[in-house]
Image (cartoon, grey):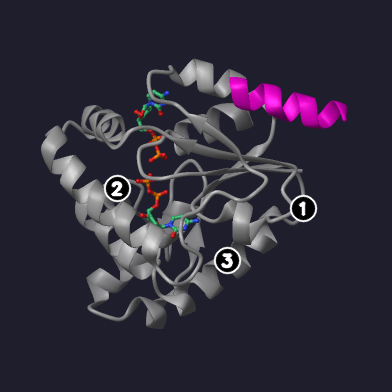
């Protein structure tokens, strides 16, 4: 079974997906971490993301390894976010990573989060959730999370949201059959409870 969670930056995808996976005993897939690894590798090598996408070895788990090196923190900087979003607009990169993601979720129970899980990676997912929140709230959450200034985070987030929603290949979009959840003003616990309830309903039917 796949639970797909998509949405823009700071909507709460990672936190919600992690908690839902833990509650249900599913495995968590952070697809954004893969784009972040490709973006970081391209930046560090001064190469095109398309050149490195097929070469790098990405290991996802408690720590994230790029060709055996621990990049868990390095992929979370604002520069790495920007590099990831640029890399993610390249169809060659997308094809390489979507293929890997589809292999990963083919067996077992998964909570997978990203931008195109419900539309491209797992269009047959049993449960699809599209998380949103106002841009200001998303920036405020991220600013608290990384100890940065809200205005700076909002400016970077706006550029990334715009690129993610307007790119030609697999843009950020809610699947037609996704449940949209505006989390503005909701606590993380509220959101986790709602998503867990959607999975329980689906299992009953
Ligand atoms: O993965 P994504 O960028 O969508 O967001 P995240 O990293 O999971 O969440 C950003 C921050 O917002 C985290 O510190 C969460 O604890 C916080 N938060 C949330 O995710 N959902 C709420 N309803 C309230 C706060
Ligand atoms: O946590 P946050 O939502 O800020 O970012 P992320 O999920 O780690 O994704 C980083 C970047 O990778 C995004 O800005 C997207 O450009 C890209 N991405 C994507 O295109 N497709 C996915 N399934 C996941 C991420």
Q: Report which residue position mark 1 lands on.
A: 107
Q: Report which residue position mark 3 lands on.
A: 98
> How many badges with numbers are in the image?
3
Labelled pair 1, 3 in contact (Cβ < 8 Å): no
145 is higher (above) or lower (below) than 161: above
Q: Report which residue position mark 2 lands on.
A: 76
Examine the image and state in which quarter residue 69 appears.
Answer: bottom left
- Residue at image position (52%, 16%) is 190
N-terminal-most mark, 1 or 3? 3
- Residue at image position (55%, 74%) is 95
Labelled pair 2, 3 in contact (Cβ < 8 Å): no
**Quick check: is 89 in the magenta stretch?**
no
Helix, strand or loop status at disc 3:
helix
**Quick check: is 195 in the magenta stretch?**
yes
- Residue at image position (35%, 69%) is 87
Alpha-carbon distance for marks 2 and 3? 21 Å
N-terminal-most mark, 2 or 3? 2
Alpha-carbon distance for marks 1 and 3? 15 Å
N-terminal-most mark, 2 or 1? 2
Provide the residue span drawn in magenta: 194-205
Q: List x then y, in percent, for residue 153.
A: 19, 41
Kindly report the secondary structure that dominates the magenta region of the rendered protein.
helix
Q: List x then y, in percent, for residue 201.
A: 78, 25
Helix, strand or loop status at disc 1:
loop
Q: Residues within 10 Å of mark 2 (few under 14, many from 20)?
A: some
């Amino acid at each position: 079974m796949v639970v797909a969670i998509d949405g823009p930056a700071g909507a709460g995808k990672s936190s919600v997906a992690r908690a839902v996976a833990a509650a249900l005993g599913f495995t968590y897939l952070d697809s954004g971490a893969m784009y972040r690894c490709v973006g970081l590798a391209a930046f560090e090598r001064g190469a095109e993301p398309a050149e490195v996408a097929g070469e790098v070895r990405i290991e996802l788990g408690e720590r994230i390894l790029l060709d055996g090196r621990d990049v868990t923190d390095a992929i979370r900087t604002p520069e790495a976010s920007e590099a990831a979003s640029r890399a993610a607009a390249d169809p060659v990169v997308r094809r390489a990573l979507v293929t890997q993601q589809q292999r990963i979720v083919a067996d077992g129970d998964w909570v997978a989060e990203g931008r195109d899980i419900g539309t491209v990676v797992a269009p047959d997912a049993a449960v699809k959730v599209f998380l949103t929140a106002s841009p200001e709230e998303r920036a405020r959450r991220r600013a608290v999370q990384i100890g940065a200034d809200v205005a700076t985070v909002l400016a970077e987030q706006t550029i990334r949201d715009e690129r993610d929603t307007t790119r030609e290949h697999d843009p950020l979009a809610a699947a037609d059959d996704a449940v949209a959840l505006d989390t503005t003003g909701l606590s993380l616990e509220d959101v986790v409870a709602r998503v867990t309830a959607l999975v329980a309903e689906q299992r009953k039917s």
